[in-house]
């Protein structure tokens, strides 16, 4: 059983609940924009938000941002230990530091002592940057083990164990191996993800492969999908990955690829429905199918769904036809049916 840590009111290390995280891509000091994005992310299901702290103004903005949001906030610090201290004093619920750029010095001890004083956890976020010049993966893993073990020991010797660890690489296979290694080495919760994952297509596929493999092995206590896209997409992808592993209760939308038998604008309906159903807290499978000839049968395992006709759709439940819905009422009617189910 992993150690549990608390980030604000969110527990990391509960095997039955993997909190979803994201990171803002606004300037943190631009409080209005940052809060507006955090609210959108919270609405989408984000449970912990990280912000970049690049100067004192960013650190101090955390105090104001915290008053306006409802989820815990993590300050992401590189290089300057004073920003970590300022962020903690401004009310950050956790800080993330990188062993590669806040090395073992008295400065690090000051950060540890401040986190202890405010009783907040620290994520040691290791990434591939510091071992990029090593060519073989075996040597990279050896180097990782040495570096991260040494760094963790510094915290433990300072009597600080309120830790979370992450190892994110650009190479998906190496990231999987590195997390397996950390899972074996440490009892601390693991934040899993892939760094520089790519856009909404490549990043989704690469992240799903890594996170899916690790979660299937019971590795990972909190996840962040990194995408070069609207951060809300990161939450949607994270939810889909967790749903497959039974770690997120929500609606699974299934839909056929369509073929020559489809006579309605099904893609538009799927695109319009998806954001709505992602917000509904129900464990259901909903099917949107192209034709009523094969659709209900092909999706008979779905709890409910629609299959297209000409300017209308057939509502079905567990493969059984219920009633017809005119084209212009499909979205509203299907959402009503889901809510009433
Ligand atoms: S449900 Fe109908 S439209 Fe969709 S793929 Fe099957 S046959 Fe084609």
Image: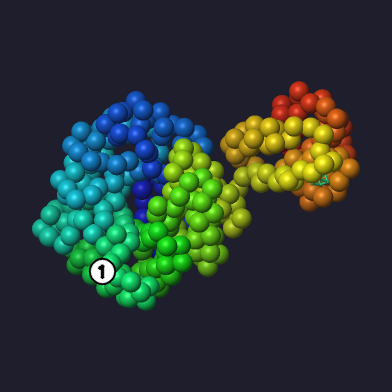
Q: Position of residue 224 (x, y in %)?
A: 44, 50
View extreme (top): residue: 328
Would you place residue 3 above or below residue 195 in this image? below
Quadrant in which ligand 1 is drawn: top right
**Secondary element type, mark 1:** helix
Residue pictured at 24% horizontal, 60% vertical: 99
Front residue of this view, candidates 175 and 106: 175
Would you place residue 44 above or below residue 137 in this image? above
Q: Where is residue 203 in the image (x, y as percent from the top left)?
A: 49, 51
Residue pictured at 46% horizontal, 40% vertical: 229
Quarter where residue 279 is shown:
top right
Q: Position of residue 260 (x, y in %)?
A: 82, 41
Identify the residue under disc 1. 147
Residue pictured at 10% horizontal, 58% vertical: 106
Quick check: can you spot residue 214?
A: yes
State the quadrant of the C terminus.
top right
Count all numbered tags in the image, as a single digit. 1
Front residue of this view, candidates 159 and 326: 326
Say whether residue 201 is left or right of residue 77. right
Residue pictured at 78% horizontal, 51% vertical: 301
């Amino acid at each position: 059983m992993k150690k549990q840590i608390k980030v604000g009111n969110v527990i990391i290390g509960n095997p039955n609940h993997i909190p979803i995280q994201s990171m803002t891509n606004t300037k943190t000091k631009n409080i209005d924009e940052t809060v507006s994005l955090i609210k959108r992310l919270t609405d989408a299901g984000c449970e912990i938000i990280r912000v970049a702290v690049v100067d004192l103004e960013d650190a101090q903005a955390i105090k104001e941002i915290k008053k306006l949001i409802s989820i815990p906030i993590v300050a992401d610090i590189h290089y300057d230990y004073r920003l970590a201290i300022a962020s903690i004093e401004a009310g950050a619920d956790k800080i993330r530091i990188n062993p590669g750029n806040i090395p073992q010095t008295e400065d690090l001890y000051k950060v540890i002592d401040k986190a202890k004083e405010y009783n907040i956890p620290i994520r040691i976020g290791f990434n591939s940057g510091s071992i990029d010049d090593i060519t073989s993966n075996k040597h990279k893993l050896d180097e990782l083990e040495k570096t991260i073990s040494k760094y963790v020991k510094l915290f433990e010797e300072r009597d600080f164990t309120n830790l979370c660890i992450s190892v994110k690489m650009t190479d998906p296979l190496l990231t999987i191996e590195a997390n397996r290694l950390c899972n074996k080495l440490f009892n601390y919760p693991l934040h899993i993800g892939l760094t520089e994952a790519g856009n909404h297509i490549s990043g989704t596929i690469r992240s799903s492969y890594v996170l899916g493999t690790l979660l299937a092995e019971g590795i990972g206590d909190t996840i962040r999908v990194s995408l070069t896209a609207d951060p809300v997409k990161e939450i949607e992808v994270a939810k889909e990955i967790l749903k497959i592993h039974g770690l997120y209760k929500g609606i699974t939308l299934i839909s056929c690829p369509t073929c020559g038998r489809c006579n309605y604008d099904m893609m538009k309906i799927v695109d319009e429905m998806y954001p709505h159903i992602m917000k509904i807290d129900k464990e259901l499978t909903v099917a949107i199918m192209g034709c009523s000839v094969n659709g209900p049968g092909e999706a008979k395992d779905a709890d409910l769904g629609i299959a297209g006709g000409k300017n209308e759709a057939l509502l079905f439940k567990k493969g059984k036809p219920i009633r017809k819905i005119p084209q212009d009422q499909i979205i509203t009617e299907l959402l009503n049916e889901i809510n009433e189910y």
